[in-house]
Image (cartoon, rainbow, N blue to C red):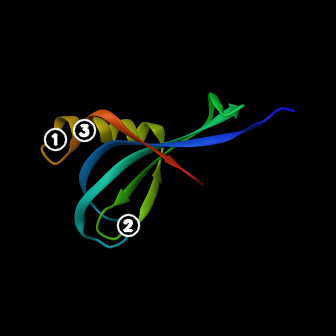
Amino acid sequence: MIIFGTKGYLYQLAILTLVCGHCGNPAAHTLRKRVTKFTLFFVPLFPFSTSYSTQCTFCGAEQKVTKEQAEQLRAQAQDGPGGQVSGQSQQQQYRP
């Protein structure tokens, strides 16, 4: 018997102050990276899906962004006074 499946990971890359496109409030937004890995016998082997998104902390609206946009936002957070980058990415497991 072979046991296989997937396991998801959620990384918080940065916290930015942006104007929300949904509620229109200037609020903190978290930049997140979701990675889904293939598992064999409960051991994560390789990633097969990666996506990036921002989430408004005021209203909770989530917007998907491309990898290039995520890199630009992360660079903006490192350079600008309105952003914060974690020294090490926080990791959470999620269930889609």
User: Residue 49: x percent and y percent?
Assistant: 61, 39
Front disc: 2 or 1: 2
What type is the residue that disc 2 sits on?
Gly
Residue at left offset 87%, top offset 33%: 1
User: Of helix, strand and loop, which one carries label 2?
Assistant: loop
Report which residue position mark 1 lands on: 80
**CB-based contact (under 8 Å), mark 3 and mark 1:** no
- Which mark is in front, 3 or 1? 3
Residue at image location 21% in from the left, 35% down from the top: 78
Q: Secondary structure at mark 3?
A: strand
Q: Are marks 2 and 1 in contact (CB under 8 Å)?
A: no
Q: Residue furthest left?
A: 81
Residue designated by label 3: 85
In this rendering, would 36 be left or right of 71? right
Q: Mark 1 Cα within 10 Å, few/some/many (few <14, many 20+)?
A: few
User: Of the residues shown, which amino acid type is indicated by label 3?
Assistant: Val
Which residue is found at the position 41% from the left and 46% from the top?
32
Q: Is residue 95 left or right of residue 20?
A: right
Q: Nearer the viewer, residue 22 or 34?
A: 34
Q: CA distance from mark 2 to mark 3?
A: 20 Å
Image coordinates of residue 93 in percent, x first then y, are 50, 45
Determine which residue is flagged by label 2: 60
